[in-house]
Amino acid sequence: MHVWSVANQKGGVGKTTTTVALSSLLADRGKRVLMLDLDPQGSLGSYFGHAPEQAANSSFEWFVGPGRLSDQALRQCIQPTAYKNLMLVPGSTALATLERSAVTQEGMGLAISRALSKLWDDFDYVLIDSPPTLGVLLINALAASEQLIVPVQTEFLAIKGVERMLNTLQMVNRSRRHPLPFLMVPTLFDRRTHASVSSFRYMRKTWPEVTWQAAIPVDTRLRDASSQGVTPLSLDPESRGVQAYGSLLKTLLKMEADRLAGTVEASHA
């Protein structure tokens, strides 16, 4: 199982669209994919018709104390979608209450890691749609992951917020055995506007080693897919947005392959 998180401490940058697009592309390749919604706003679940006000069988249940959640109860939270190989654990507004209990409940930061360990052979990939605020939910997502994807809207205010995410990542890495690899992905790119072009250039100049060299364009077909509750791939596989996400997936898979190759080489050294 490979676990990827999609995160940014700013809303409206394309986290949910990125999660759905990449997940559907992986599923189309024959991979067994689980999408996990850890945002109290429940945007990922809402995308597929699940109301975040419904707390039953949501990711909230995965934060029950260690050893108290049975394998059966864990799997009851996994919902089918209309697509082969693509499953979902929807989010819930109840997730917002976890910050208070996290103070008193030991090990809360590893709840998702423990839950996923019970599903290790069930899925090839898990993609986590993370909340835009620093707290126990984002910490859980980062702790469970081996790859972080940071969508960054190509506009000035969004780029100013990147430093917050980088600071959070630095903090999390202090408690990890190995630093969490990450890739910043320029999103909502509009080559017709100076603001978008200059923001894209700034990202590539300031963080060249961790910024994807392409960008996800503004594409109404991505918005159409969201409003219809279907994956961008199923709505229009030839759209600019889907083609861009396909290119991004190739980059991420290459990063993953290079990382695994490096691990094997290190073990033989």
Image (cartoon, rainbow, N blue to C red):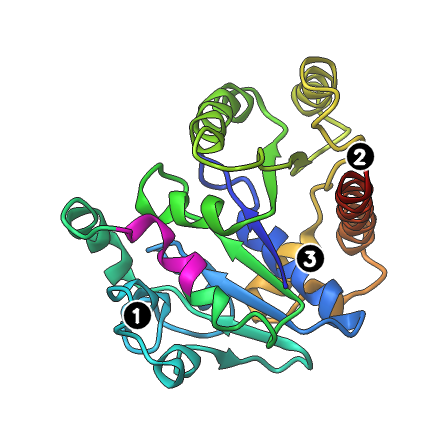
* Disc ID at residue 214: 2
Q: Please, what is the three-letter code of the amino acid marked with disc 3?
A: Leu
Labels 3 and 1: the sequence-earlier one = 3
- Sequence-first disc among 1 and 2: 1
Distance between mark 1 and mark 2 Cα atoms: 38 Å
- The x, y position of residue 109, in whole percent, is 33, 48
Work out whether 64 lies above or below 11: below
What is the number of the mark on residue 61? 1
- Residue 146 visible in the current orientation: yes
Q: Is 178 placed left or right of 84 in the picture?
A: left
In the image, which residues are magenta? 107-114
Give me the residue at 44% from left, 57% from top.
113
Q: Is residue 15 above or below residue 227?
A: above
Q: Quadrant of residue 255?
A: top right
> Whole-Å distance between the Cαs marked 3 and 1?
25 Å
Q: What's the residue type where badge 1 is placed?
A: Glu
